[in-house]
Amino acid sequence: MTAMKEIAVVAFSQSDCLARAGAANEVELIMPQLRAVFGQVGLNNAQDVDFVCSGSCDYLQGAAFAFVAGVDALGAVPPIKESHVEMDAAWALYESILKIRMDQAESALIYGFAKASAGELPTVLSQQLDPYYLAPLWVDSVSLAAMQARLLIEKGLATEQAMAGVVARARKHAMVNPHAQVSGEVSIETLLAADTVVSPLRESDCAPVADGAAAMIICTVDKAREWGVPYAVISGIDHRIETHNLGMRDLTDSPSTRQAAAGAGVGRGAVEVAELCAPFSHQEIILTRALGLGDDTVINPSGGVMAGNLMMASGLARIGEVFRRIVSGDISRGVAHATSGPCLQHNLVAVLESA
Amino acid sequence: MSEDTEAVTRIETPVYLQYNFTAGRAPARFLERIRQGVLTGQRCPRCANVYIPPRGSCPACGVPTEEEVVLPDKATVQSFTVVAIPIPNNPIKPPFVIANLVLDGANISFIHLMSECENSEVHIGQRVQAVWKPEAEWTYAMDNIRYFKPIDEPDVPVDRIGRLPIGGWEDEQ
């Protein structure tokens, strides 16, 4: 591992989480975030980095190759080296890290974006299921998560009170998050008084879906020193995926998260902060256990995605939140997590440390 | 394999998803203006290129475009094709001409129809002008312009296509 090039995060920005971004198109959502990260490092545009990678999902826009339009935000003349993942931008970060470790780049711009409000998101996400058995049934993402929560409760690994506790804590933390869509003091009793939408999930158990974008710049540690900007080091990153066949998974556990955490070296030091991408309250309970986090770890100090779930950028934003806390000197080591697919099918874990 | 366990080689799983498409702030302004019969592009504050329809950014520079530029309805053929094959559900009967046209004062082409022309005589550099629908039929759409027709102006050399001033070819000469 020591031979591997150390990766530094030098800039991060995300938009406010908005339920509807109004008239803005994707390019108009991306550009302010790119301006912000270029500004943090003192760069002009994408010409000043060696590689660009984005994360988005054409199904959310409802148009084939919709992600290509995002390139209009970059300043790609003369041509740049550019790539895309049809995933959360946390995986665009992963690709960019590989690019740097393969000596093909010293720096990279990563961005993720979505205007999820254009479609009926839970239904749109049914089309990420396997095309033969599940997608034709139109099983929506909320129903699948509810099934997972039900299994968790029946196994005695969670309660509706504990799930409401996750929501109440997230909303309280989100009060200091200027980008939050939902925040404030709310009691567990108040949350539990609401009806379920898909039992046992209440609306409050489901992360509020948001339109917007996030961007990050990473580089080698040498480059970060040359640029003279504060940075955090990504000391480990790994991602693992479970089978697409939901019937073959233990939905009450997240072995892929556990494996990714081991690969990223989560256990090699104290975890002061963990930013977890848990779009449903019970999933935070699963993830906390899979990551082996104890009471000495502050979970989702930003409010996590319960404060606002920027589709295709929330995973990257978790890494950005840990980066911000390290660079500001609040913490020296934290863990960030991103997820993809139904019921936490695919998980990425990153460890960030102070330089 | 016996008859009653014949291999399944094909299933049909239709996908219907509904979207509320939003064009974007800059394209929405373009659509509002074309509803009034006005063609509006946007100029890049850095390279000064004018884009129509505008997307809200200069793709070359990666900066937002804010300044609006009203453009004339005269254009130059940048490239074209004669469509000979009928397209399902397309009301236009072949053969017809589809062209990439650059408006005077703009630096990027858009696709539109050409008509009132001999298809065999359409050529790169040819000067054309919009033929609009009657004002009563105008809506938020590019097909407020029915098509472009050739006009009696000299051809634009290839290296000048996409670089004419707003005043057009006569101003340039």
Image (tube, coloured by chain):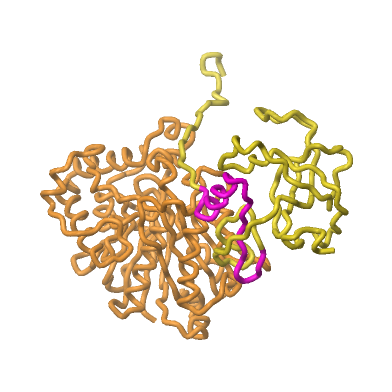
| In this view, A25 is above or below A119 | below
Q: Left or right? Give the position of A218 relative to B48.
A: left
Percent x, y for residue A191?
16, 48
Depth check: A308 or A103 in front? A308
Percent x, y for residue B147?
72, 40
Q: Look at 75% across and 52% down and name the residue there.
A: B75
Colour orange belongs to chain: A
Work out which residue is located at the far front of the displayed protein and give it.
B135
Locate residue A72: give its quadrant.
bottom right
| In this view, B130 is above or below A238 | above
Q: Look at 53% across and 66% down and name the residue there.
A: A98
Q: Look at 57% across and 54% down and name the residue there.
A: A69
Q: Which residues are magenta?
A: B23-49
Work out which residue is located at the far left of the displayed protein and give it.
A189
Work out which residue is located at the far top of the displayed protein and give it.
B3
Percent x, y for residue B46?
62, 71
Q: Left or right? Give the position of A136 relative to B119.
A: left
Q: From the image, which quarter does the C terminus of chain A lie in? A: bottom left
Is B162 included in the stretch rendered in magenta?
no
Is B41 included in the stretch rendered in magenta?
yes
| In this view, A328 is above or below A139 | below
Depth check: B154 or A251 in front? B154
Depth check: A213 or A261 in front? A213
Rendering colour (chain B): yellow
